[in-house]
Amino acid sequence: MADSGILADFVMNPDSELDERSQQILAMERLWWKYAGAKEQAITKQFSVSPANYYQLLNQLIETDAALAYDPMLVKRLRRLRTTKRRVRTGNNSTVS
């Protein structure tokens, strides 16, 4: 999976509770913006899933304690972004959850 592109230098952390694919998904979120090209194309190439399926996996992943332990800053940022997008979609722009 991590043979080229964004995840070419990916190294799995064997001490993590996360499996390799979950670690790769978090690595993709951490690194994708550094590279030219569409993120959706990179997702399809790296994971052989549709972008919609990838984002479902990502949203499930960032809710886990293992993901939070693996990369707390990234997971917290992704959770904040998700909350902000939901507020915008629903028209609820208040800061109180």
Image (cartoon, rainbow, N blue to C red):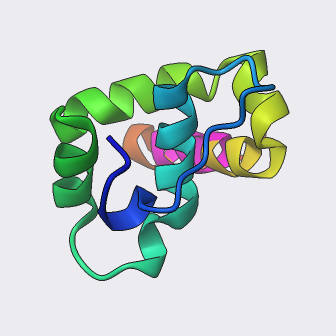
Q: Which percent across, then down, holds residue 36?
A: 29, 82
Residue 97 visible in the picture: no
Horizontally, residue 48 falls left or right of residue 76, namely: left
Above or below 68: residue 25: below
Q: Main secondary structure of the magenta part?
A: helix
Magenta part of the protein: which range?
A: 79-87
Q: Nearer the viewer, residue 10 or 70?
A: 10
Could you tell me if residue 13 is visible in this image? yes
| Residue 95 covered by magenta stretch | no
The residue at 32%/53% (across/down) is: 3
How far across and how far down the image is residue 25, in percent?
47, 40
Residue at horizontal 70%, vertical 28%?
67
Between 4 and 36, the one lying in front of the other is: 4
> Quick one: quadrant of the C terminus?
top right
Name the side, left or right, on which 74 lies relative to 1. Answer: right
Determine the image quadrant of residue 75: top right
The answer to which of 73 and 97 lies nearer the viewer is 73
Q: Residue at x 21, y 69 (%)?
A: 38
Q: Nearer the viewer, residue 32 or 20?
A: 20
